[in-house]
Image (tube, grey):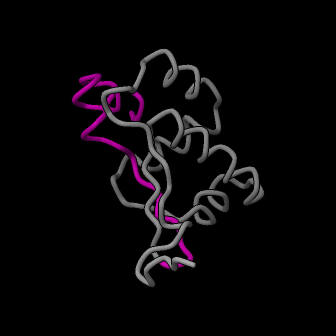
Amino acid sequence: MALMPATSSYHDKIPHPPASSLELATIMRTLGDPIRLEIVRLLGDDRPRVCNELSSTLGIPPSTGSYHLRLLREAGVTRTQAQGTLRLISLRRDDLEERFPGLLDVLTR
């Protein structure tokens, strides 16, 4: 039986769509929800946050926050980085700026 290296685990491999596959229609549909748009605005200062911090700030249950964060990640708006048991959430600013110049500036105003 092959063992996975101790420095990597299944949970560290959080899938993100490649920048080249980001679609404006998908992003805009995802951001049509007021909670998800507010998450993007909160992340607009480029300070990574943990899920619980965002949920607490928005006054929503952690499970609801996780749901919205998953949709934002799958649409390519955010990046989730595993750091131990924490998941740091940040905007994919460089990828989005390259594909859709000025979009994040409009959304985070």
> Residue 26, relative to residue 59: is it above or below?
above
Q: Nearer the viewer, residue 20 or 71?
A: 20
The answer to which of 52 and 25 lies nearer the viewer is: 25
The magenta stretch is 84-109
Residue 73 relative to residue 17: left or right: right
Give the residue drawn at x 64%, y 39%. 35
Instruction: Tell me the quarter of the picture where residue 31 sits.
Output: top right
Q: Which residue is drawn at the image coordinates 39% and 26% (left, top)?
A: 22
Q: Quadrant of the N terminus?
A: bottom right
Residue most extreme to the bottom: 6
Counting from the top left corner in percent of width and height, residue 60 is at: 74, 53
Above or below for 2 versus 69: below
Residue 50 picture location, percent across and down? 53, 65
2 left or right of 59 in image:
left
Relative placement, left or right, of 60 versus 92 is right
Q: Residue at x 77, y 57 (%)?
A: 61
Please check the rendered image and state whether residue 102 is part of the magenta-colored stretch, yes or no: yes
* x and y, in percent, of residue 41 in the image: 46, 42
In magenta segment, residue 20: no
Q: Is residue 34 left or right of residue 50?
A: right
The quadrant of the picture occupied by the C terminus is top left
Residue in the image at 35% along x and 51% along y: 45
